Image (tube, rainbow, N blue to C red):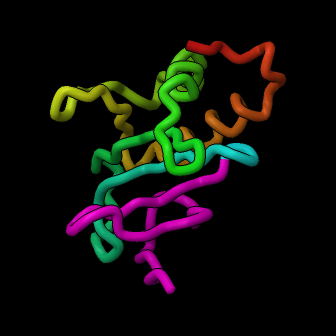
Amino acid sequence: MTPELPMSLYRVPDWQDALCTGTWQISYRLDDGRMLMFWGGAPDAPSRADREWGVVVMSGRVRDLAGEQSLLANPAFARQVRTCVIDGGTFLVTMEGQIDTVVDAARADFAGPPEERVTA
Protein backbone atom coordinates (compact mmCIF):
# COMPACT_ATOMS: atom_id res chain seq x y z
CA MET A 1 0.00 0.00 0.00
CA THR A 2 1.50 3.31 -1.05
CA PRO A 3 1.16 6.34 1.21
CA GLU A 4 -1.33 9.06 0.44
CA LEU A 5 0.32 12.07 -1.12
CA PRO A 6 -0.13 15.39 0.66
CA MET A 7 -2.09 18.09 -1.15
CA SER A 8 -0.37 18.22 -4.51
CA LEU A 9 -0.39 20.28 -7.66
CA TYR A 10 -1.08 17.25 -9.86
CA ARG A 11 -3.85 14.68 -10.14
CA VAL A 12 -3.66 11.31 -8.44
CA PRO A 13 -1.28 9.11 -10.47
CA ASP A 14 -2.19 5.69 -11.86
CA TRP A 15 0.77 4.30 -9.94
CA GLN A 16 3.30 5.61 -7.41
CA ASP A 17 6.14 4.25 -5.32
CA ALA A 18 9.68 4.93 -4.15
CA LEU A 19 12.23 4.97 -6.97
CA CYS A 20 15.25 5.01 -4.66
CA THR A 21 16.13 6.55 -1.31
CA GLY A 22 14.76 10.10 -1.23
CA THR A 23 13.20 9.95 -4.70
CA TRP A 24 9.55 9.26 -5.50
CA GLN A 25 8.02 8.19 -8.79
CA ILE A 26 4.53 8.75 -10.11
CA SER A 27 3.22 7.27 -13.35
CA TYR A 28 0.29 7.87 -15.68
CA ARG A 29 -0.94 5.42 -18.32
CA LEU A 30 -0.55 6.66 -21.91
CA ASP A 31 -1.83 3.59 -23.78
CA ASP A 32 -1.93 -0.18 -23.32
CA GLY A 33 1.84 -0.53 -23.18
CA ARG A 34 3.28 2.82 -22.15
CA MET A 35 3.45 4.90 -18.99
CA LEU A 36 4.66 8.45 -18.49
CA MET A 37 6.82 8.36 -15.36
CA PHE A 38 7.89 11.37 -13.33
CA TRP A 39 10.65 11.07 -10.72
CA GLY A 40 11.65 13.47 -8.00
CA GLY A 41 10.39 14.88 -4.75
CA ALA A 42 9.28 12.66 -1.89
CA PRO A 43 5.84 11.40 -0.86
CA ASP A 44 5.71 13.63 2.20
CA ALA A 45 7.32 16.75 0.65
CA PRO A 46 5.06 19.78 0.37
CA SER A 47 4.11 20.67 -3.20
CA ARG A 48 6.09 23.34 -4.98
CA ALA A 49 5.19 24.49 -8.48
CA ASP A 50 8.86 25.19 -9.26
CA ARG A 51 10.21 21.76 -8.16
CA GLU A 52 11.82 19.88 -11.06
CA TRP A 53 10.72 16.34 -11.90
CA GLY A 54 12.39 14.03 -14.40
CA VAL A 55 10.11 12.66 -17.13
CA VAL A 56 10.49 9.39 -19.03
CA VAL A 57 8.25 7.30 -21.25
CA MET A 58 8.32 3.67 -20.19
CA SER A 59 7.29 0.73 -22.36
CA GLY A 60 6.96 -2.08 -19.89
CA ARG A 61 10.10 -1.81 -17.78
CA VAL A 62 12.22 -0.22 -20.53
CA ARG A 63 12.67 3.45 -21.34
CA ASP A 64 11.04 4.30 -24.68
CA LEU A 65 13.43 6.81 -26.26
CA ALA A 66 11.50 6.84 -29.57
CA GLY A 67 8.32 7.66 -27.63
CA GLU A 68 10.07 10.55 -25.89
CA GLN A 69 11.34 11.90 -29.22
CA SER A 70 7.85 11.64 -30.67
CA LEU A 71 6.45 13.63 -27.75
CA LEU A 72 9.12 16.30 -28.15
CA ALA A 73 7.87 16.82 -31.72
CA ASN A 74 4.47 17.78 -30.25
CA PRO A 75 4.55 21.54 -29.48
CA ALA A 76 1.94 21.19 -26.71
CA PHE A 77 4.27 18.76 -24.93
CA ALA A 78 7.60 20.40 -25.81
CA ARG A 79 6.57 23.79 -24.36
CA GLN A 80 6.28 22.20 -20.91
CA VAL A 81 9.55 20.26 -20.78
CA ARG A 82 13.23 20.82 -21.30
CA THR A 83 16.12 18.43 -21.68
CA CYS A 84 19.05 18.08 -19.32
CA VAL A 85 22.10 15.84 -19.15
CA ILE A 86 22.54 13.67 -16.07
CA ASP A 87 25.62 11.47 -15.88
CA GLY A 88 25.97 11.49 -19.66
CA GLY A 89 22.33 10.62 -20.39
CA THR A 90 19.75 13.07 -21.73
CA PHE A 91 16.48 13.29 -19.81
CA LEU A 92 13.32 15.33 -19.99
CA VAL A 93 12.48 17.62 -17.07
CA THR A 94 9.35 19.55 -16.14
CA MET A 95 8.15 21.55 -13.17
CA GLU A 96 5.75 20.04 -10.64
CA GLY A 97 3.15 22.68 -11.50
CA GLN A 98 3.16 21.45 -15.13
CA ILE A 99 2.75 17.71 -14.54
CA ASP A 100 -0.97 17.61 -15.42
CA THR A 101 -0.39 19.65 -18.59
CA VAL A 102 2.46 17.33 -19.64
CA VAL A 103 0.33 14.23 -18.97
CA ASP A 104 -2.61 15.66 -20.95
CA ALA A 105 -0.40 16.55 -23.93
CA ALA A 106 1.28 13.12 -23.89
CA ARG A 107 -2.04 11.29 -23.66
CA ALA A 108 -3.45 13.32 -26.54
CA ASP A 109 -0.37 12.56 -28.63
CA PHE A 110 -0.41 8.82 -27.94
CA ALA A 111 -4.18 8.68 -28.55
CA GLY A 112 -3.71 9.89 -32.13
CA PRO A 113 -3.35 7.54 -35.09
CA PRO A 114 0.18 6.08 -35.36
CA GLU A 115 0.68 7.57 -38.83
CA GLU A 116 0.30 11.07 -37.33
CA ARG A 117 3.03 10.47 -34.74
CA VAL A 118 6.64 11.32 -35.33
CA THR A 119 8.99 8.40 -34.76
CA ALA A 120 12.71 8.56 -34.16
Q: In the rendered image of this protein, does residue 79 appear above or below residue 97? A: above
Q: Residue at x 26, y 28 (%)?
A: 89
Q: Which residue lies furthest to the bottom in this view?
A: 1
Q: Is residue 45 magenta?
A: no
Q: Residue at x 59, y 54 (%)?
A: 28
Q: Nearer the viewer, residue 114 or 81?
A: 114
Q: Which of 94 and 66 is in front in this view?
A: 66
- Which region of the structure is painted magenta? 1-29
Q: Residue at x 77, y 14 (%)?
A: 116
Residue 94 x, y percent position in the rendering = 38, 38
* Quarter of the rendering occupied by the C terminus: top right
Residue 20 x, y percent position in the rendering = 27, 64
14 lies left or right of 52: right
67 lies left or right of 109: left
Which quadrant of the view contains residue 71?
A: top right
Residue 55 x, y percent position in the rendering = 42, 41
The mark total stands at: 0
Q: Which residue is drawn at 41% across and 77% down?
A: 6
Q: In the rendered image of this protein, does residue 37 appear above or below residue 65? A: below
Q: Is residue 23 magenta?
A: yes
Residue 97 x, y percent position in the rendering = 42, 48
Q: Which of 33 and 44 is in front in this view?
A: 33
Q: Which residue lies furthest to the right in this view?
A: 113
120 lies left or right of 22: right
Q: In the rendered image of this protein, does residue 30 appear above or below residue 111? A: below
